[in-house]
Amino acid sequence: MRILLIDPPFYRFMGYYNRYFPLGLAMIAGALRKKGHEVEIYDADANVNPNKMDFSRLEDSYIGYLNRVKDNNDEIWIELKQKLKEFKPDVIGVGVWTTYAASAFKIAEICKSTLNGVPVIFGGPHITIKYDETLKICKNADFLIRGEGENTIVELISLLSEKKSDELESIKGLSFRKDRDIVHNQNRPFIEDLDNLPLPARELLVNKGSYDSEDMGLIMTGRGCPYLCAYCATAIWGRKVRNRSLEHIFKEVEIVKSSYHTVQFTFKDDSFTVNKNRVTEFCNELIKRKLNIKWDCNTRVDLVDKALLCLMKKAGCIGVKVGIETGSERVLSYIEKGTTLDKARKAAKIFKETGMFWTAYLMMGVPSETKEEVLQSINFMKELKPDYISFSVYEPFPGTKLFDIGVEKGLVCKERNYEDYFNINPKYYYVKDIERKSDAMNIGEMAELEELIKNEIHIYNKSFGRLYKRAISKSMVYFKDPKVFVRDIKKFLAWL
């Protein structure tokens, strides 16, 4: 069958830079191609002319995003219709995240009107959590895949191609409509051996020219996270970490380096160093193979030590990102981060001693957080002195413990209807009352604090010393691929 997988437009509608390729869809594409299907990945969010980079101001563009999503004559939707007519798919697959649900719903509507009768399949994080709501409100979605989708979609496409709709209830992890009823089949167990999955099919992207070598370097070496942070929906993938073998990972690294001249990779695991012995083995093997690549990863302040970071740096690691989140011990406990301020201090000291470039994630606005605690967070950042601060205002995402707490406190609306997704600011899709985003601060205090922090952090991040350290960490990447350097200069200017 001819299958078109679509990553919905979001950042592109607002003129923002959007890094990387849609990894999840590339994994799905690889699994389908292995079964003999003709597959293309249409990344409708790939932006060839971005002009914005300050993501702390992203919310300012959300109204424009919603207006463009609703405009049937928008150039992006015209492009989508043209793609549908050219490829003539037998089946459409769409990845859905909560923030851009409206865009995904609109794609389903356009697919149905352009290609009469084509089945539309939804998958992704939002669907895994809000599958029942989605089937009730989105009439243009025919099938929903919950959880990991590689095996589920292969089985579904097999039955659709053989016209065996009477056997749909045998597919684990699938939700669909049957007559006037909604059917949710039993959950599918997690994939235990990730080496059995094909590598992400980057070559099936229809707009490869919109990516540079660094964009193609996104790699997931494992799935799952053993931690249960109350603001994160990662728990839906299970607390057990399932790792790919090192041989499987290096095979992908070598193919990507050879095919796209990539020398800068990002290992996107939730906590890359959760198994220090595995990371040690990985680094030693990377050094032994003399692949001469640079890379960065996510980790936690309680999952690093000086010896490990020195080895990682020797193996080409040029940056780590860690969630500090807050400067309040009480808030840390409330969000069940599982760390302490002293552990963050210790990690910051190690980063400085090893010369590792590090990014600190900071968040404000979780339920019960006071103005004084937010100010503590800013002071704590000044104490830690990270090389870069990534700031966000808390959003209540379905599937998280804080979402459920928000419902109990009357801050969060448990469900939404179809029109809500097209008319509510995506940042506040599930906020019950925009005038009461917090139970500890009024709307005026929240807005004042948010603006104060954004301005302070922007000035902090613009420090020449920090910018210079970041540039030096990527010098080899710039030398190997000047296009990355040019792109980063454009990003820097847009950010300023």
Image: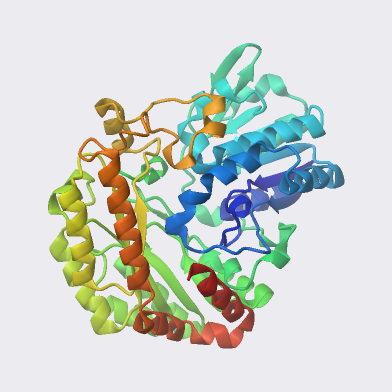
Q: Determine the residue located farthest toward the top in the rendered image.
A: 180
* Image mark count: 0
Vertical side of 250 occupied by 57: above or below: above
Vertical side of 466 occupied by 134: above or below: above
In the displayed structure, does residue 286 sit left or right of residue 422? left
Quarter residue 232 falls in: top left
Q: Position of residue 274 (x, y in %)?
A: 31, 61
Vertical side of 319 occupied by 239: above or below: above
Q: Position of residue 378 (x, y in %)?
A: 23, 62
Q: Which residue: 25% across, 45% down?
A: 445
| Depth check, front residue: 222 or 71 | 71
Q: Which residue: 81% across, 34% down?
A: 114
Quarter residue 116 falls in: top right
Q: Is residue 354 visible?
A: yes
Vertical side of 201 occupied by 229: above or below: above
Q: Is residue 36 visible?
A: no
In the displayed structure, does residue 351 sit left or right of residue 127? left
Q: Position of residue 147 (x, y in %)?
A: 50, 39
In the displayed structure, does residue 138 sit left or right of residue 445? right
Question: Where's the N terminus, which quadrant?
Answer: top right
| Depth check, front residue: 258 or 441 | 441
Quarter residue 489 falls in: bottom right
Q: Which residue: 46% across, 37% down?
A: 189
| Depth check, front residue: 314 or 20 | 20
Colour logic = rainbow
Q: Position of residue 86 (x, y in %)?
A: 86, 47
